[in-house]
Amino acid sequence: MTLLDETLAALRPLDPEAVRAAQEHQARLTKPSGSLGELEAIAVQLAGLAGIDPPPLPEPAAVAVFAADHGVHAQGVTAWPQEVTAQMVGNFLAGGAVVNALAAQAGATVVVVDVGIASELGPAAGLRQHKVRPGTADMTVGPAMTRDEALAAIEVGIAVANDLVASGSRCLLTGDMGIANTTASAALIAAMLTTDAGQVTGRGTGIDDALLRHKVDVVRRALALHSPDPTDPVGVLSAVGGLEHAALVGFIVAAGALRVPVILDGVIAGSAALVAAALHPDALVACVAGHRSAEPGHARALAALRMRPLIDLDLRLGEGSGALLALPLVQAAVRVLRDVATFDSAGVTDKA
Amino acid sequence: MTLLDETLAALRPLDPEAVRAAQEHQARLTKPSGSLGELEAIAVQLAGLAGIDPPPLPEPAAVAVFAADHGVHAQGVTAWPQEVTAQMVGNFLAGGAVVNALAAQAGATVVVVDVGIASELGPAAGLRQHKVRPGTADMTVGPAMTRDEALAAIEVGIAVANDLVASGSRCLLTGDMGIANTTASAALIAAMLTTDAGQVTGRGTGIDDALLRHKVDVVRRALALHSPDPTDPVGVLSAVGGLEHAALVGFIVAAGALRVPVILDGVIAGSAALVAAALHPDALVACVAGHRSAEPGHARALAALRMRPLIDLDLRLGEGSGALLALPLVQAAVRVLRDVATFDSAGVTDKA
């Protein structure tokens, strides 16, 4: 039995008794019923995930930034040179990037995982070397990777999640770095939702109209070449995915198996979540949608998954930034269920 | 010269040089330009407010919960008994309410101000006694308060802000407690925007359709009785406002005069911000909209003020809860401008 098979076999739905207990508990808190909106749903979900009301606080938290390169970069889908992937990883390791600033603000740890950067990086503190291959192949010419490589990258994500939780993390956050990875995300979303590339391909880090038209055409050509089958999620990943997308699939399902919440960042994680959902009906049991990015495919993916994002501020950075901004909201949702007095205990009159 | 006049006289617009410096600085950070969306605008605003780039971190933070009762409660606009205002203040002081849990999560201090609770509260740690009158009068029968009382309540808010900043707070958050205060908020918004009550009156803590129709009628009758003039904001407050609304007007303008950011909570603060904006063109220079509540009047108020809320999760609790949830986002916006490396310093290639 592979690590992926073991992980999928450990998935269970939310615990219905803990869900019911949390709902009843929440209704007795000294606040109008329902007045914390979406946060109440998250508190109940996390109780069901932990199997106890109230659930533990989701801390300490760790964001795993899976970094990889993309063969489709050769098609000119972005204004950024490919070496920026490795340069930004250096920036993460030096503590100078947005993910570092936001993690410091939120009290989270940053781990960086090389799952497929094109160049060779030397050893560095905070860098986990799990390169499956030095970047994917160009999906417009052939499959981005083999099926075995996709499975290996998925298992990198599982292993990282397992290790973080074994080391004490009680909340996982998805992060990513990979120049051209919104192209692979758009292809994955179009394939999984059987939608035209034009509906789900966006401007990434900010390309102009002409480049966007070209990017849509690149995604369309890749889909035409592979005709990916959405009922074969590993096949879809192999054909048009990225190594960081595959790792995120593993990271997400492992969080579910570990019963530890995982906060999804933007469109890269959203496309990985679509793939994960096709692997197992309970694959997303631990997932909270951290934010909705400016990428049109992300809104489509979240809608298909019926997930409501916590943050919606036109972010389009990646790195885990949206997940880190959502972390205090998830912690607040649980904190309310843990710490707020009930009408009885506080001597407050409930409404008529 | 009154405290209000002094405070208004100290207001200035954002410092244009600091705004320009922050914009140029932000463009050099190691991230795609614009990729932090709304957070970038907040970082620039806070630089302009502080007059320096980067601005100081907005911490430590303090939420001031202004509590008062409402004579219009007699019209049966809510399912909650009036004594719940005082009971919830007791809950705040005992640390058992949502505002306490969220403040603990965000590292903020809670201060509770009695600006007009109907009953007498004994002295308690954390309670500031500044009662202007024991609740407003019923706005459907006569003015909610006199003009002098409205001015006194505004000056309570100014004094609280001045005191908090003198004690070291570097970020202020609005909070409120007052059974029936969404009725006064709706009346204020309808008056300031010259809109029908039906457009801006909501379900507050969760009333049913019949009670909502009645609440709209109550607001409409109050407006018909007073014909409030939106160019006389203190007159509008006196006619249909609440004592906590008046205090929040003072709190908001004082934050601007002190050049300390103030994060607005929900519809109560939103209606107060409309009144403040009519007092001085730079009254809202320090304001950040923390969230958009489920109340329809709040969306109208924010739109009129051209403010984009950071959190939009169907919250309708008050107490400062939405402002507290937004606090880490405001801190994150500044943290990025302070801590993230530039392309030059990090050796990262900017896009072509």
Image (cartoon, coloured by chain):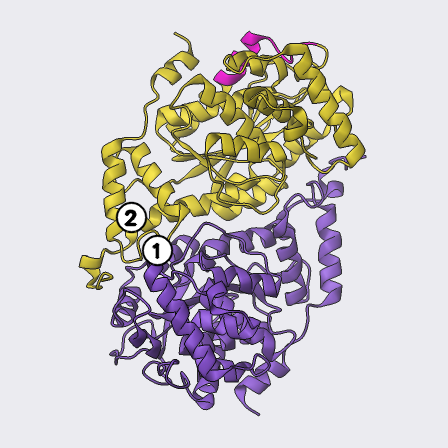
Chain colours: A yellow, B purple
Q: Nearer the viewer, residue B212 or B293?
A: B212
Q: Position of residue A189 (x, y in %)?
A: 58, 25
Q: Is residue A88 left or right of residue B69?
A: right
The chain identifier of the residue carrying mark 1 reads: B
Quadrant containing the C terminus of chain A in the rendered view: bottom left
Q: Nearer the viewer, residue B170 or B19?
A: B19
Residue at image coords 41%, 58%: B321
Label 2 residue SS: helix
Tell me which secondary structure the magenta stretch mostly adopts: helix
Quadrant containing the N terminus of chain A in the rendered view: top left
Q: Is residue B251 left or right of residue B69?
A: right
Residue at image coords 23%, 52%: A28
Please tell me in which quadrant of the rendered image residue B230 appears. Answer: bottom right
Q: What's the residue type where badge 1 is placed?
A: Ala
Q: Position of residue B53 (x, y in %)?
A: 69, 59
The chain identifier of the residue carrying mark 2 reads: A
Please tell me in which quadrant of the rendered image residue B83 appears. Answer: bottom left
Q: Is residue A106 above or below residue A82?
A: below
The residue singled out by tag 2 in the image is A338
Residue at image coords 41%, 68%: B216
Q: Nearer the viewer, residue A327 or B211?
A: B211
Q: Which mark is residue B101?
A: 1
Look at the image and say whether residue A151 sits in the magenta stretch.
yes
Q: Residues within 10 Å of mark 2 (few under 14, many from 20)?
A: some
Q: Are marks 2 and 1 on the same chain?
A: no
Please tell me in which quadrant of the rendered image residue B192 appears. Answer: bottom right
Q: What's the residue type where badge 2 is placed?
A: Arg
- Assess whether mark 1 and mark 2 are in contact (beta carbons under 8 angstroms): yes
